[in-house]
């Protein structure tokens, strides 16, 4: 987590006096990709980097924001039905409007915020931003919304103010994270369980491909639309409730593309359960194999990978890494790797070298530290 001293200092410079500091993290996801909006399972954990904000109510209807990393400021009236056009500020605006709609008596406030979660890495910097403000405003304006409701406010912000029809995984993880534990969330029922994550002989390492294909909004929504079409033909609410037999019986009535998308999702729901069982037996090699299978599905059937991520996963396999796959929505960002500790240094050296040779750019390893969810500092 970034040291908040500099944010506090900038708050003084911009607004005078002091505010209260809050933090919400980004997330990783062990397995269960693109399953959340299909009512399936996900297996995320919060990380130790995220977004911090220093916030203070100002007894006016105006919100004054300073985004320290961008060195941009923004001002809007909480009653304004349009809000700012700059996406970065729309996350905060959306949270404000959704919290008001949920009955919290939000007033104006001054805030400075910034973070250390790499942008475009698929680690959910936007969910961290939404959750940081949702948590802060609930606290400062005496809201009584629980964490799941705050997570849903973040998700609604993506849907209505940014245009990404995301699932609940990222905001859920940012709100509920617990140090040293992953969480398995059933996105249909909202039930979840903590799984201690302290394998002695393995490490989780992200490799940031440092590419971001500017496709994120619409291809994501198109994947979701494919899933919804198949679910509706199968007569179920979400693909979670579609059986393999049902999918096969629909095959001639749906496009080859929709069929492949649905096949990936059904397989992924099964893989999360396989990973849960393997974890109970501390069988990390099986966890890793399932991760490779997920990548195959994401790349070939769901088509959300890219040459850089496919290369990183192939290299991981070649170098003997136990499991590797692209993480998050796709189209760039990170691979997540389950690596035996004894192999870790060698893997990192080799993969950085071969990636540079192949693409002429540096990839960036990120050691995963599983941290706490949103909180007041
Ligand atoms: C993005 C979305 C999540 C989830 C993942 C893919 O991170 O925000 O809701 O769908 O992609 O698993």
Image (cartoon, rainbow, N blue to C red):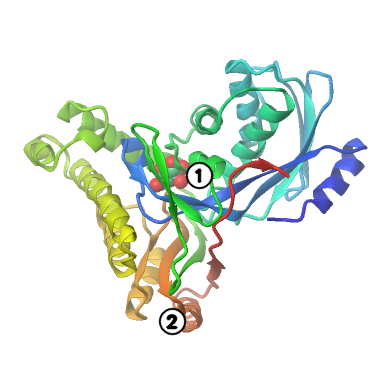
Q: Is mark 1 within 8 Å of ligand 1?
A: no
Q: CA distance from mark 1 to mark 2?
A: 29 Å
**At which x and y percent is residue 20?**
79, 38
Most foreground residue, 167 or 173: 173
Q: Is mark 2 within 8 Å of ligand 1?
A: no
**Image check: 218 left or right of 58?**
left
**At which x and y percent is residue 143?**
65, 22
Q: Which quarter of the rendering shows the N terminus? A: bottom right
Vertical position of residue 323 compared to residue 36: above or below: below
Where residue 226 is drawn, which disc sits there?
none
Q: Is residue 162 visible?
A: no
Label 1 element class:
helix
Count the labels in the image: 2
Vertical position of residue 224 compared to residue 288: above or below: above
Q: Residue at x 44, y 77 (%)?
A: 358
Disc 2 residue crowd, few under 14, some 14–19, many 20+, Cα 10 Å: some
Q: Residue at label 2?
A: 343
Q: Residue at x 52, y 39 (%)?
A: 171
Q: Is residue 172 visible?
A: yes
Q: Which quarter of the rendering shows the C terminus? A: top right
Disc 1 residue crowd, few under 14, some 14–19, many 20+, Cα 10 Å: many
Label 2 element class:
helix
**At which x and y percent is residue 227?**
27, 37
Most foreground residue, 220 or 271: 271
**Marks 1 and 2, the one that precedes in the sequence:** 1
**At which x and y percent is residue 225?**
31, 34
**Image check: 212 left or right of 49?**
left
Please identify the quarter of the rendering in which residue 138 is found. Answer: top right
**Image check: 68 left or right of 99?**
right
Where residue 173 is drawn, which disc sits there?
1
């Amino acid at each position: 987590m970034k040291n908040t001293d500099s944010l506090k200092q900038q708050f003084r410079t911009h607004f005078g006096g002091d505010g209260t500091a809050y933090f919400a993290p980004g997330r990783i996801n062990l397995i269960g990709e693109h399953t959340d909006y299909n009512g399936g399972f996900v297996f995320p954990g919060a990380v130790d980097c995220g977004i911090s904000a220093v916030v203070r109510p100002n007894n006016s209807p105006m919100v004054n924001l300073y985004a320290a990393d961008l060195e941009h400021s923004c001002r809007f009236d909480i009653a304004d039905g349009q809000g700012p056009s700059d996406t970065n500020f729309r996350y905060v605006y959306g949270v404000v409007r959704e919290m008001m709609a949920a009955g919290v008596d939000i007033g104006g406030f001054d805030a400075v915020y910034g973070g250390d979660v790499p942008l475009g890495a698929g680690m959910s910097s936007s969910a961290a931003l939404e959750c940081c403000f949702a948590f802060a405003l609930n606290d400062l304006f005496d809201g009584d919304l629980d964490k799941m409701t705050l997570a849903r406010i973040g998700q609604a912000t993506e849907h209505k103010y940014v245009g990404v029809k995301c699932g609940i995984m990222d905001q859920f993880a940012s709100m509920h994270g617990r140090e040293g534990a992953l969480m398995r969330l059933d996105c249909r029922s909202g039930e979840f369980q903590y799984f201690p994550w302290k394998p002695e002989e393995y490490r989780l390492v992200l490799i940031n491909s440092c590419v971001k294909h500017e496709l994120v909004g619409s291809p994501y929504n198109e994947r979701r639309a494919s899933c919804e079409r198949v679910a509706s033909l199968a007569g179920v609410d979400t693909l979670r409730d579609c059986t393999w037999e049902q999918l096969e019986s629909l095959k001639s009535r749906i496009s080859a593309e929709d069929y492949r998308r649905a096949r990936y999702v059904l397989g992924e729901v099964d893989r999360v359960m396989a990973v849960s069982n393997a974890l109970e037996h501390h069988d990390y090699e099986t966890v890793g194999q399932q991760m490779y299978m997920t990548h195959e599905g994401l790349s070939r059937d769901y088509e959300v990978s890219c040459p850089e991520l496919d290369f990183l996963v192939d290299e991981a396999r070649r170098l003997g890494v136990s499991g590797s796959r692209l993480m998050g929505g796709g189209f760039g960002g990170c691979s997540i790797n389950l690596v035996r500790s004894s192999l870790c240094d060698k893997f990192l050296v080799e993969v950085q070298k071969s990636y540079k040779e192949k693409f002429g750019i540096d990839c960036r390893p990120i050691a995963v530290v599983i941290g706490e969810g949103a909180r007041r500092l």
